[in-house]
Image (cartoon, rainbow, N blue to C red):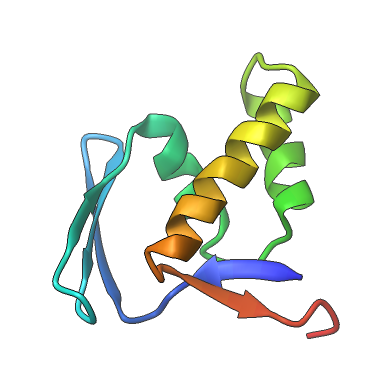
Amino acid sequence: MRIGQLPELVASNIDGQIALLSINNGAYYGMDPIASRIWELIAQPRSGQEVCEQLLLEYKVSAEDCRQQVLDFLQKLSEADLLLFHDAKA
């Protein structure tokens, strides 16, 4: 399964950090630089594995820590209804 940004969100990059506003629930979300990078990576639908592979090229982190932190972050985005899920075949 691939994960992408929900198109109804308003996003702004402020000094390298993403700020999101959900039109659907009126909530504001601020992201630190690494979360912002994950958000940028899912501008085009990607799997969690693909996100981790890219982050491992960019940051000094173990594969296991990267996988766990990416999954945790994507879970939080999902719980806040900020993600769009795509069939892997698409």
User: Would you say 16 lies left or right of 88 here?
Assistant: left
In the displayed orientation, state which residue is furthest to the right: 89
Residue 6: x and y in percent read 43, 75
Residue 81, compared with residue 19, is above or below; it is below
Residue 25: x and y in percent read 20, 75
Residue at x-position 56% and y-position 59%: 42
User: Would you say 40 lies left or right of 61 here?
Assistant: left
- Return the residue nearer the eye: 44 or 27: 27
> Could you say which quadrant of the image residue 31 lies in?
top left
Residue 28: x and y in percent read 17, 58
Q: How many marks?
A: 0
In the displayed orientation, state which residue is furthest to the top: 60
Residue 84, compared with residue 12, is above or below; it is below
Residue 7, compared with residue 76, is above or below; it is below
Looking at the rendered image, the quarter that the N terminus falls into is bottom right
Looking at the rendered image, the quarter that the C terminus falls into is bottom right
Residue at x-position 24% and y-position 52%: 29
Residue at x-position 77% and y-position 39%: 53
User: Would you say 28 lies left or right of 87 here?
Assistant: left
Residue 60: x and y in percent read 65, 14
User: Would you say 83 lies left or right of 58 here?
Assistant: left
- Return the residue nearer the eye: 90 or 63: 63
Residue at x-position 71% and y-position 39%: 52
Residue 77, compared with residue 52, is above or below; it is below
In the displayed orientation, state which residue is furthest to the front: 79
